[in-house]
């Protein structure tokens, strides 16, 4: 099994666990991933698996999580089973909200996506009194991503970063630099290995290539919107209204209403509409168990955030899709890779977060 290093939050090594019952470690492109480790309490260094300590899969800094949950149960034969759960290090942004500058209703910035994301992290995780994470540093700004104008006021920082990521296609993460004893926040852009591009050898996942053991395809309009009516400030007939989106008509037009009365400048209403439409995309995804013995090596030929081609000729389906999640599963029966190509259906908790986010915008304006 893959050894698991245990570190303190200050990145000092406490020991390793290499004898465990199961481990699942999921990396995500748009938001923090999650993990679960199940082991016997009696194995060496299990006592170091404490809340807020870090676990690192092998020696890979990009597969590092922070323990947020611990439970011990007695099994049928009297054995003591320890389960720890947590998230990748980006989860610390969930502990902060976006606080506007003094005298300003909103923290507003118009720039490339990378600059915008790093601005909100710098301000709310480093600059504000009492809010700093002492070990956190921001990676060099390469000014990647499209230009956008973003405004935020008392929003959860993790959710803001996720929204910008989904809108612009940039991924983000926090990972440890053990040598410098720092936690690094950075954004990144997945590589393009789709069949249609000409710059790199293509990566294709298909039963015909014998690199897929199972597939599940989803095409859903359950939460879809392609045309937005955005309502700004004012009352009744005096309320500012902007409409934007697809030219589709009839059955193909899916209208959503966006309450944007928190936006003071009417010129910024289209941007809010585009952001909300990005949250209501048509869901087209493949979820697959990828064979580790296939022709393309995970972590070398492809990884989280990369764009690849997925197909199933028996279903008459071929699509280029970004790899948005990879779950590594280690069990006694062997090693598995569960991969999500494209965006999966939102969970109930994600729908609630979106709804509550709109409510909070109204209640804090």
Image (cartoon, rainbow, N blue to C red):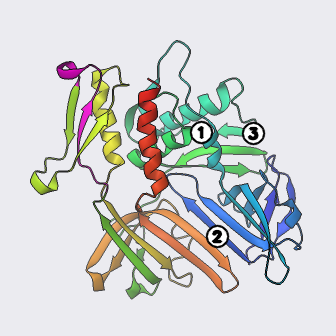
Q: Earlier in the sequence, mark 3 or mark 1?
A: 3
Q: Tell me: residue 268, above or below residue 328.
A: above
Give, as a single range, the part of the protein colored magenta. Answer: 223-240
Say which quarter of the image contains residue 5.
bottom right
Residue at 75% in and 39% down: 135
Name of the residue lying farthest toward the top: 103
Q: Earlier in the sequence, mark 1 or mark 2?
A: 2
Q: Which mark is residue 24?
A: 2
Image position, residue 98 (x, y; %): 55, 30
- Frontmost residue, 75 versus 112: 75
The quarter of the picture where the C terminus appears is top left
Q: Which residue is mark 1?
A: 140
Residue count near mark 1 (Cα–Cα under 10 Å), binned few <14, some 14–19, many ≥20? few
Q: Is residue 133 visible?
A: yes
Image position, residue 194 (x, y; %): 37, 67
Q: Secondary structure at mark 3?
A: loop
Distance of label 3 from label 1 (alpha carbons): 16 Å
- Frontmost residue, 326 versus 296: 326
């Amino acid at each position: 099994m893959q050894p698991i290093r245990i570190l303190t939050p200050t990145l000092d090594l406490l020991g390793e666990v290499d004898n465990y019952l199961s481990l699942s470690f999921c990396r995500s492109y748009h938001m923090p991933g999650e993990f679960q480790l199940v082991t016997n309490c009696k194995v060496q260094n299990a006592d170091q698996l404490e809340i807020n300590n870090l676990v690192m899969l092998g020696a890979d800094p990009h597969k590092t999580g922070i323990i947020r949950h611990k439970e011990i149960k007695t099994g049928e034969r009297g054995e003591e089973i320890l389960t720890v759960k947590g998230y990748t290090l980006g989860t610390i942004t969930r502990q902060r909200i976006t606080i506007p500058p003094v005298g300003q209703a909103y923290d507003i910035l118009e720039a490339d996506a990378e600059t915008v994301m790093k601005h909100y992290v710098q301000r709310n995780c480093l600059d504000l009194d009492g809010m700093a994470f002492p070990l956190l540093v921001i990676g060099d700004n390469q000014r990647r991503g499209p230009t956008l104008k973003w405004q935020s006021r008392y929003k959860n920082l993790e959710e803001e970063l996720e929204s910008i990521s989904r809108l612009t296609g940039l991924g983000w993460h926090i990972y440890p630099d053990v040598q410098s004893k720092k936690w690094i926040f950075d954004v990144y852009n997945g590589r393009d290995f789709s069949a249609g591009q000409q710059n790199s050898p293509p990566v294709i996942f298909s039963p015909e290539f014998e690199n897929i053991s199972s597939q599940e395809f989803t095409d859903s309009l359950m939460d879809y919107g392609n045309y937005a009516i955005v309502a700004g400030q004012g009352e009744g007939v005096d309320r500012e209204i902007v409409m934007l989106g697809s030219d589709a008509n009839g059955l193909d037009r899916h209208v959503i209403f966006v309450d944007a009365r928190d936006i003071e400048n009417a010129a910024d209403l289209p941007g809010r509409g585009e952001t909300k439409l990005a949250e209501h995309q048509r869901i087209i995804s493949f979820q697959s168990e990828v064979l580790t013995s296939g022709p393309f090596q995970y972590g070398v030929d492809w990884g989280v955030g990369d764009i690849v081609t997925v197909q199933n000729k028996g279903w008459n389906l071929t699509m280029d899709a970004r790899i948005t999640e990879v779950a590594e599963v280690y069990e006694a029966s062997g090693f598995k890779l569960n991969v999500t190509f494209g965006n999966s259906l939102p969970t109930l908790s994600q729908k609630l977060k979106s709804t509550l986010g709109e409510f909070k915008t109204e209640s804090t304006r």
